[in-house]
């Protein structure tokens, strides 16, 4: 094949934050907003990539980490990770189109990486197994871009389905579809982009990842999900920071499984309190929220949201609020008003709907 178009969606997480890199559970879904890559094969071993708003980069297919920086690192990193996994990527001209702005915490970088990985292999008619693509994208992020992220974002992007959330089991790399039809239940999942750009390559994310890995070693479990007696485990940790981090992860894993049960039983409204508890845990125990995220959650709840929480890595980005459809406008207005009063940037709103995952479009 000489040309083709591939696309991959952004994601939101219903619940299960900062659980993926300790091999736990998460429940994201793919959004309708996608990154689209139109690709043309080149046989001179070079890659050019042009992105709306970000300009153009050009490099040889084979580069080493550090050689391509900025947004191009997400493209070069995928080529690098594909090559390292033995799936020789091709030279190509890539034209990239993105639907929503970068930095909203909806994982624009993973949707770009998934679409590029599909294009660079699809041009060769070499469709890789999705679980392998999950690891390749993680390798690109961790080893080339330098962000120590987990597997949730690319699993949502690669395994998403319309009207289904994706139960991610990061240990076994399995993705199970879970029914998730907010609209037909009279509900809406409102996304509030707080317009405070998130940043998790800056050490905070990695520090938490390290604390969790150290804690599971100290507790003698393979992963924190294997902790069965939480109070007993916490009593064995000396460091109060580790106590808070572990408490978040263990309880968050349990919240994911509880939310899945409720969704399967069609009891959608009842996931609201789990969302709110997740936010409190991310604020107090995991300490990854900022004033904009807390304000959006508080204002949404005060205006009648059934539950609300930050999503993604934290330190900025977006919040989701589960609302009755009839309350959508009033909850949005209450959040916008709270932001005005605090002097924050004007937030942006949209309704999230579980949509199809990454694939070939043409
Ligand atoms: C980022 C990472 C994910 C996940 C979330 C936090 O989005 O890319 O792997 O760790 O943060 O849950």
Image (cartoon, grey):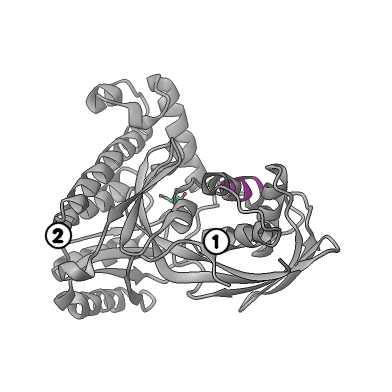
Out of 80 and 71, give the one closest to the viewer: 80
Q: Is residue 187 visible?
A: no
Magenta residues, start to end: 138-143
The quadrant where residue 255 appears: top left
> Residue at horizontal 73%, vertical 69%?
2
Which quarter of the image is occupied by the C terminus?
A: bottom right
Whether disc 2's CB lies below 8 Å from ligand 1 is answered: no
The residue that appears at 18% across and 79% down in the rendered structure is 330
Element carrying mark 2: helix
Say if residue 220 shows up in the picture: yes
Residue situated furthest right in the rendering: 44
Q: Is disc 2 surrounded by few (<14), some (14 to 19) or many (20+) residues within 10 Å?
A: some
Question: In the figure, residue 268 lies in which quadrant?
Answer: bottom left
Q: Position of residue 178 (x, y in %)?
A: 29, 52
Who's the residue at 58% across and 50% down the image? 137
Q: Nearer the viewer, mark 1 or mark 2?
A: 2
Q: Which corner quadrant holds the N terminus?
A: bottom right
> How many tags in the picture?
2
Q: Is residue 219 above or below residue 84?
A: above
Q: Nearer the viewer, residue 325 or 234?
A: 325
For label 2, the residue is: 269
- Is disc 1 placed on a helix, strand or loop? helix
Question: What crowding class fits label 1: few (fewer than 14 Cα within 10 Å), some (14-19), or many (20 or more)?
Answer: some
The picture places residue 239, in percent across and down from the top left corner, at 37, 28
Q: Upstream in the sequence, badge 1 or badge 2?
A: 1
Q: Nearer the viewer, residue 179 or 61?
A: 179
In this rendering, is residue 1 above or below 275?
Answer: below
Q: Is residue 139 magenta?
A: yes
Disc 1 residue lies near ligand 1 with CB under 8 A = yes
| Residue 190 shown left or right of residue 41 in the figure | left
Q: Which residue is mark 1?
A: 109
Residue drawn 70% across the image and 47% down it = 87
């Amino acid at each position: 094949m000489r040309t083709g178009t591939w696309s991959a969606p952004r994601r939101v997480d219903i619940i299960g934050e900062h659980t993926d890199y300790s091999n736990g559970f998460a429940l994201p879904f793919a959004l309708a907003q996608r990154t689209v890559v139109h690709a043309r094969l080149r046989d001179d071993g070079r890659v050019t990539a042009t992105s709306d708003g970000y300009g153009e980069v050009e490099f040889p297919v084979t580069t080493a980490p550090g050689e391509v920086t900025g947004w191009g690192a997400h493209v070069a990193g995928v080529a690098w990770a594909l090559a390292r996994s033995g799936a020789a990527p091709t030279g190509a001209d890539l034209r990239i189109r993105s639907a929503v702005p970068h930095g909203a915490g909806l994982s624009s970088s993973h949707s770009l990486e998934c679409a590029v990985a599909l294009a660079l292999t699809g041009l060769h008619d070499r469709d890789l197994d999705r679980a392998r693509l999950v690891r390749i994208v993680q390798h690109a992020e961790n080893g080339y871009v330098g962000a120590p992220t987990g597997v949730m974002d690319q699993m949502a992007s690669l395994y998403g389905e319309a009207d289904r959330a994706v139960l991610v089991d990061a240990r076994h790399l399995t993705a199970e579809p879970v029914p998730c039809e907010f609209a037909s239940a009279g509900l809406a999942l409102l996304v509030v982009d707080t317009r405070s750009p998130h940043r998790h390559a800056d050490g905070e994310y990695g520090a938490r990842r390290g604390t969790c890995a150290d804690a599971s070693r100290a507790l003698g479990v393979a992963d924190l999900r294997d902790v069965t007696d939480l109070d007993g485990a916490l009593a064995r940790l000396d460091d109060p920071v580790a106590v808070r981090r572990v408490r978040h992860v263990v309880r968050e894993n349990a919240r994911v499984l509880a939310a899945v049960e409720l969704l399967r039983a069609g009891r959608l409204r009842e996931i609201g309190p789990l969302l709110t508890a997740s936010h409190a845990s991310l604020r107090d125990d995991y300490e990854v929220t900022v004033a904009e995220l807390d304000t959006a959650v508080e204002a949404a709840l005060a205006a009648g949201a059934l539950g609300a929480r930050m999503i993604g890595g934290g330190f900025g980005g977006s919040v989701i609020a589960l609302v009755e459809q009839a309350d959508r406008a009033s909850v949005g207005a209450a959040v916008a008003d709270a932001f005005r009063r605090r002097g924050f940037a004007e937030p942006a709103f949209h309704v999230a709907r579980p949509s199809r995952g990454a694939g070939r479009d043409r």
